[in-house]
Image (spheres, grey):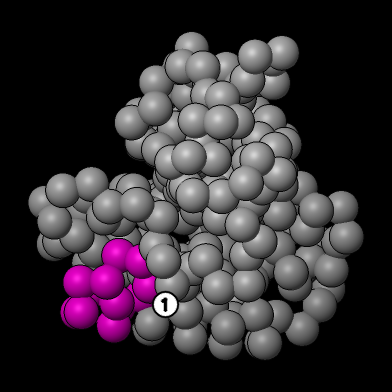
């Protein structure tokens, strides 16, 4: 059974952000296919909102490069395996760059933050809560971005985060139903991440990247930063 965007995540969002979040998830999941034409009237009726939040949602989705605004509405752009790979390529570049900026800082707080989120990820699996797992997984990785104390790096991460969130959520929902035992592997891989950050071990981080992202990013070595 398909689930929509988690209702508990909508708190604090504007109506436009909420509409964008639901449409984004449907595009990433393939429920809304490429070349589909979305109109303001259609979406306003579907979500029981005025056209103003829909226009706001369309602007956000265009920023995500999921739609192209046209005179008659918004055309859904392709979002397939190539687009997913490119997104993960960028994610890996950001995380490896964040790691390079952490050599001369006290990494104790970020390691503690990562361990906290990893423990919460394990609890989420016990309760079969893919939504909570997704939030803590993203916060786990985001901890290194924040610790880099690099303004523009944070800006680029925030730009990519909504689509990454949708991808991770869909993946974890599927795993929770069909491959729950795989979470033991995921937890072990995240332990490698923590060890790499704690000791600022570039070889260990490379190992962590391969363990976590080989299935989505085949060119990890090509953008590794030492």
Q: Nearer the viewer, residue 152 or 31?
A: 31
SS class of the residue under badge 1? helix
Q: Position of residue 176 (x, y in %)?
A: 19, 60
Please name the residue shown 56% across and 25% down the image: 39
Does 177 appear in magenta? no
User: Along the horizontal axis of the image, is 132 left or right of 161?
Assistant: left
Q: Position of residue 11 (x, y in %)?
A: 55, 73
Please provide the residue range marked out in magenta. 121-132
User: Along the horizontal axis of the image, is 173 left or right of 11?
Assistant: left
Image quadrant assignment for residue 80? top left
Compared with residue 214, is residue 162 higher up or lower down, i.e. above or below?
below
Compared with residue 198, is residue 200 higher up or lower down, i.e. above or below?
above
Is residue 99 among the parts visible in the rendering? no
Please name the residue shown 43% across and 41% down the image: 46
Please name the residue shown 75% across and 72% down the image: 147
Is residue 132 among the parts visible in the rendering? yes
Does 126 appear in magenta? yes
Image quadrant assignment for residue 108? bottom right
Please name the residue shown 88% across and 60% down the image: 151
Q: Residues within 10 Å of mark 1 (few under 14, many from 20)?
A: many
Q: Which residue is mark 1?
A: 118
Q: Position of residue 131 (x, y in %)?
A: 36, 66
């Amino acid at each position: 059974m398909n689930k929509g965007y988690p209702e508990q995540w909508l708190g604090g969002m504007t109506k436009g952000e909420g509409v964008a979040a639901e449409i984004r998830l449907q595009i990433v999941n393939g429920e809304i296919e490429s070349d589909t034409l979305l109109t303001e009237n259609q979406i306003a009726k579907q979500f029981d909102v005025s056209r103003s939040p829909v226009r706001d949602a369309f602007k956000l989705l265009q920023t995500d490069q999921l739609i192209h605004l046209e005179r008659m509405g918004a055309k859904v752009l392709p979002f397939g395996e190539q687009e997913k790979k490119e997104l993960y390529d960028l994610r890996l570049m950001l995380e490896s760059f964040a790691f390079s900026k952490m050599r001369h800082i006290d990494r104790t707080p970020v390691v503690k933050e990562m361990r906290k989120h990893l423990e919460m990820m394990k609890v989420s699996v016990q309760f079969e809560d893919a939504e909570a797992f997704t939030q803590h997984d993203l916060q786990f990785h985001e901890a290194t971005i924040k610790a880099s104390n690099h303004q523009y790096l944070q800006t680029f991460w925030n730009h990519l985060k909504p689509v990454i969130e949708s991808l991770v959520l869909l993946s974890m929902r599927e795993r929770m139903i069909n491959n729950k035992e795989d979470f033991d592997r995921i937890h072990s891989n995240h332990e490698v991440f923590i060890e790499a950050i704690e000791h600022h071990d570039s070889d260990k981080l490379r190992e962590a990247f391969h363990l976590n992202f080989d299935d989505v990013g085949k060119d990890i070595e090509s953008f590794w930063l030492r």
